[in-house]
Image (tube, rainbow, N blue to C red):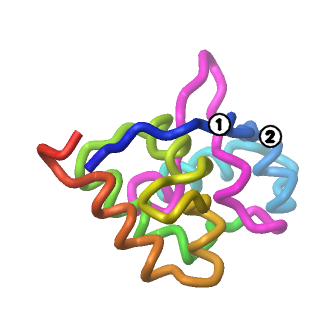
Amino acid sequence: MRTKQQHTPVRWVTLGDVAARRGDPDGAPTGAWLYEQLRDRRLIVVQDGDSLRVPAFMLTADGQPRPELRQLLHELRAAGVDGRSAASWLNSPSSLLSGEVPEQVARTDPARAARAAARFAAPGEA
C-alpha cells in the first residue's frame, strides 16, 4: 500500500565515514563488511559514482547496523523496494504510522514499524 508521503531528505554517509565509525583505518575491510550487511538485509548500501553510501540513520554511533531496523528492511527489500526508496520511506513521516517516522518508531515499537513496512511494501497496493 504505497501511499503518497512527504519525503525528508536522507543524510548519507560514505564508506570512509563508516570505516571511521568502526575504527577501521583502511576502508577495504569495511567495504567487504558493507556488502555482507547488504546481502544479509541489515543495511541499505547504494553505489553513488565510485563511492558506497549508507543512510546515516541506519548506523549506531560505533558504525553497526541498528538491529531494530532489520525486519523493516527485510519487508521492504523482499517486496522489491529499491535502496533509495526504502531509505526515503524509513526516514520520512508516514501516514501508515499516523505521521511518525518509521526509523524513529522502530526504536520504541519495532513490531508496529514492521507492520507499517509490510503494508507499505504490499504488492499491488502502490
Pick the quarter of the image with the C terminus: top left
Relative placement, left or right, of 26 versus 73 is right
Relative placement, left or right, of 105 versus 94 is right
Around disc 2, counting alpha carbons within 10 Å, would you say few (fewer than 14), some (14 to 19), or many (20 or more)? some
Q: Position of residue 95 (x, y in %)?
A: 46, 54
Rendered position, 105 above or below 52: below
Which numbered dot is residue 16?
A: 2
Q: Position of residue 73 (x, y in %)?
A: 42, 60
Relative placement, left or right, of 21 versus 13 is right
- Rounded to the nearest angstrom, the CA distance separating label 2 from label 1 is 9 Å
Around disc 1, counting alpha carbons within 10 Å, would you say few (fewer than 14), some (14 to 19), or many (20 or more)? many
Residue wearing tag 1: 53
Marked residue nearer the N-terminal end (2 or 1): 2
Q: Residue at x 75, y 62 (%)?
A: 63
Q: Residue at x 35, y 54 (%)?
A: 76
Q: Is residue 58 magenta?
A: yes
Q: For residue 33, which quarter of the picture? A: bottom right
Rendered position, 22 above or below 14: below
Q: Position of residue 54 (x, y in %)?
A: 64, 44
Q: Specify start and end residues of the magenta stretch as a single range.
A: 37-63
| Nearer mark to the viewer, of 2 and 1 | 1
